[in-house]
Image (cartoon, rainbow, N blue to C red):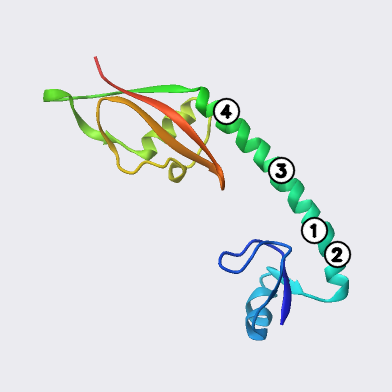
Amino acid sequence: MKVILREDIEDLGQAGEVIEVKSGYGRNFLFPRNMAIPATKANLKAIGEVSRQKDQRERKNRREADKIKESIEKLSISTEVQVGEEDKLFGSVTNADVAKLLDAEGVIVDKRAVLMEEPIKALGVYTIPVKIAKDVTADLKLWVVKKS
């Protein structure tokens, strides 16, 4: 059965694509959830308009993501932490802490968007990638300094 996808579905295709699926999958899963429509002649003509609207939305989202990226890369955030002997941190600086610091600066991101491989456990300057959109990643400069 040929269907036209109405939204992006991982491992299946992008919105607007005409794909071949098993009839039970289309009838029982895709159609009831409004994720796809049957590939009829009328629907194929209408899909051009849907894909044009999707392109406009993607361009708008990309512009917004670029603005957020620009504002993040202008920032240089510092956080004061308590340290013990040999400048070892009590605890660590995690992606949730970085998200809160960004929120205090007026840039709201989800903590899962802060791409830290592991928590920071030493003083210094770090460059932390922050994923804003599917293909837009900003580099944030974070200073971890000792509390006086």
Real-space Cα distance between discs 1 and 3?
Answer: 14 Å
Pointer 3 residue: 59
Quarter of the image with the N terminus is bottom right
Tell me the kind of residue under disc 2. Ala
Residue underneath mark 1: 50
Measured in 3D between alpha carbons, the distance from the residue under mark 4 to the one under mark 2, in whole angstroms, is 37 Å
Does label 2 or label 3 sit earlier along the sequence?
A: 2
Could you say whether the residue bearing mark 3 is in a helix, strand or loop? helix
Q: Which comes sooner in the sequence, label 4 or label 2?
A: 2
Q: x and y percent of residue 75 in the render?
A: 48, 23
The secondary structure type at the circle numbered 1 is: helix
**Residue shown at 85% from the left, 64% from the top:** 46
Looking at the rendered structure, which numbered label has been put on residue 75?
none
Q: Secondary structure at mark 2?
A: helix
Q: Is residue 15 above or below residue 1?
A: above
Dots 2, 3 in contact, CB < 8 A: no
- For residue 46, the mark is 2
Furthest toward the top, the residue is 148
Mark 4, secondary structure of its residue:
helix
Across and down, in percent, residue 56 comes to 76, 46
The vertical placement of 112 against 30, above or below, is above
Residues packed near mark 4 inside 10 Å, few (<14), some (14 to 19) or many (20 plus): few
Q: Name the amino acid type tagged 1.
A: Val
Q: In x, y percent, where is residue 3?
A: 73, 75
User: Left of 30 or right of it: where is 45?
Assistant: right
Q: Is residue 100 left or right of residue 57?
A: left
- Mark 1 vs 3, N-terminal side: 1
Q: Marks 4 and 2: CB-CB under 8 Å?
A: no
Give the class, few, some or many, for how many residues have Cα within 10 Å of label 2's Cα (few <14, many ≥20).
few
Provide the residue designation for mark 4: 70
Amino acid type of disc 3? Arg
Above or below, comparing residue 3 to residue 111 in the picture = below
